[in-house]
Amino acid sequence: MTRLFLLFATLLANMAMAMGEGTQAFPDTPENRRIVDQAWDEYRRLDAEHGQFIDVNGIRMHYLEWGDESGVPLIWSHGYSSTGYELANVGPQLAEAGYHVYSITYRGHGQTQVGDYAFSLSHIADDIAAMMDALGIERAVIGGLSLGGGVTTAFYDHYPDRVLGLVLEDGGADAVQARTEKMYEMAKQMADAIPPFEALVFNSRFEAFQAIAGFYVPGWGGNMPSGVAPMFQAWISERDDGKFVPHYDGPRLLGEGVATFDPARSHELPLLGQSWRRTHPIITYRNLNVPMLIIDPTGDPFDPSESFRRLRDLHPSLVEIVEYPDTPHAAHPMRPDWFLRDLRGLLERL
């Protein structure tokens, strides 16, 4: 069981609770109403000023762009349940540091909606390669958070010659199937407590935002990091009936029920879930020949640090591990200064 599955299960439970009871972590106050309204305005501004679409492999993929042609291309893949707005609080600074940032929203999330869910991490890697072809990018730094780290590892597996460097933020640097086996006893105890995904329906944008913030804010020490609120707005979709729901279809992406936790039933998952389980960095990176940065948030209770070190031991001159103490799984929203420091450091190593 990966940590993200466990976090996602907890998120569902907290969001379901928030629908009926609200949440003390982000209460309904005039100040919080103002935060949500401003976040909506900022989300729309970001989309107008930095949002782009590109047609690749039969889909219309959305991405945010910062920087210009003089920058080193950085293509970022978000974590599961997130979007390209994940980099909203660091995108401009990355451009100032010397990157040309392309923060994609990959298949089945946000504004990159699809009708066919028969796709894997490899399909998303193919989309990135097609995007690079269309934009005339020969090589790029490829990076991502969590499941986006899995996308990054899949990209290197298929297109190693197109990679300048790699950034794996708490994902893509350890064997997912092995962790699934290790965490199964804990995970299966949670399965019955997970509400149906279809139950996550909110009457207002504020209530949906409140439920998301109610899960993340406690993990951030009770505060919302600067620039993160527009990311939350990107996670909310308004239906034709005026109700508000998550921007992705969780069961069609990763499956639902006990099969999502059971290491012996990975073959029952959608292709995306199956391919994620098969991520094995020791195999993929056996011939690594570019710099790699692994961001290890040590505040995460499901600690894969030993796997990270094993990968570094294979390539000590190429792999750098940077620990972020007392930091949750989604590290860069909470520690933007550290993230920018380390991405600048990677730029110097290219």
Image (tube, rainbow, N blue to C red):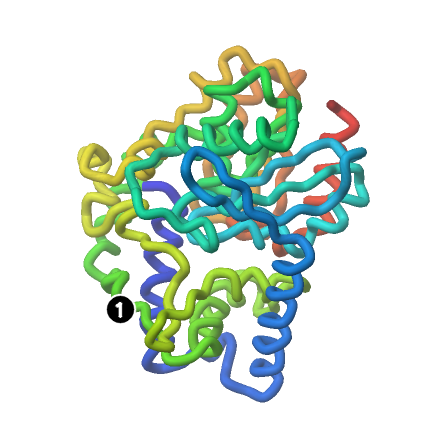
Q: Is residue 64 left or right of residue 187?
A: right
* Front in this rendered view, residue 37 or 229: 37
Read off the residue under disc 1. 199
Tell me, yes or no, if residue 316 can be seen here.
Answer: yes
Q: Is residue 113 left or right of residue 335?
A: left
Residue 226 coordinates in the image, percent (x, y): 68, 64
- The quarter of the rendered structure image containing the C terminus is top right
Residue 246 coordinates in the image, percent (x, y): 39, 62
| Quarter location, residue 36 | bottom right
Residue pictured at 72% horizontal, 38% vertical: 100
**Residue 94 higher or lower than 308, as above or below:** below
Q: Is residue 102 left or right of residue 77?
A: right
**CA neighbours of label 1 inside 10 A, class few (<14), some (14 to 19), many (20+):** few
**Residue 258 higher or lower than 150, as above or below:** below
* Front in this rendered view, residue 30 or 187: 30
* Front in this rendered view, residue 317 or 89: 89
Q: Looking at the picture, which amino acid does disc 1 mark?
A: Ala
Residue 185 coordinates in the image, percent (x, y): 24, 44
| Quarter location, residue 39 | bottom right
Q: Secondary structure at mark 1?
A: helix
- The quarter of the rendered structure image containing the N terminus is top left
Residue pictured at 21% horizontal, 40% vertical: 262
**Residue 49 higher or lower than 268, as above or below:** below
Outermost residue on the top side: it is: 287
